[in-house]
Amino acid sequence: MLDIAGHRGVPMLTEGQAINRADIEGAAAKQGIEIREGDVVLLHTGWMSILDSDPQRFGKAEPGLGMEGAKYLVSKGVVAVGADTWGVEAVPFEEGQGIFGVHQELLTRNGTYLLENMNTADLVADKAWEFLFVLGQPRYEGSVQAMINPVAIR
């Protein structure tokens, strides 16, 4: 669990703000954790906090992972990246990265799974930076997307 908003000293990142290597390394160092091969990395941007109060804004754009950050996480060997946003990556997209370029980098080129709309606020409030991440498979045969119920066990 990386509290990127906390690392930047804000309650919530804003639309299009990209999370890259310096943010990831800085948050990990501040929290005293190390990203290792096989980890699931969750990013807290604070964006989920506006879902009920401003759903139009929530669904129109978002802060999120940038291409440099995605490539860095791939180099660390993580199996999945999740965030408290609807698409994990920054929207509007970073200049020159194309439409959902981070998705293409993670999913298509590297087989790294994406976990969207993760409720990370309670984990941040509890300072649960490291935990066993448990995610069962969806009950829909042949599906590629579904609502999930992840569990963090400390």
Image (tube, helix red, strand yellow):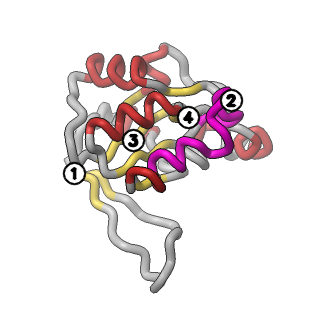
Report the side of 52 relative to 137 (left or right): right
Which residue is under mark 4?
A: 64
- Over which residues does the magenta segment extend? 90-106
Q: Residue 15 carries which label?
A: 2
Report the side of 142 relative to 12 (left or right): left
Outermost residue on the right side: it is 56
Gap in angstroms between the C-alphas marked 1 and 3 = 12 Å
Q: In which quarter of the image is the N terminus?
A: top left
For marks 1 and 4, give the one nearer the viewer.
4
Mark 3 near mark 2, Cβ–Cβ under 8 Å?
A: no
Residue at 20% of width from left, 46% of height from top? 154
**Which badge, 1 or 2, comes first in the chain's sequence?**
2
Which residue is under mark 3?
A: 42
Residue at 48% of width from left, 45% of height from top? 105
**Which badge, 1 or 4, comes first in the chain's sequence?**
4
Badge 2: few (under 14), some or many (20 or more) residues near its Cα, within 10 Å? some
Amino acid type, residue under disc 1 in the picture: Leu
**Which badge, 4 or 3, comes first in the chain's sequence?**
3
Q: What element carries label 2?
A: loop
**Which badge, 1 or 3, comes first in the chain's sequence?**
3
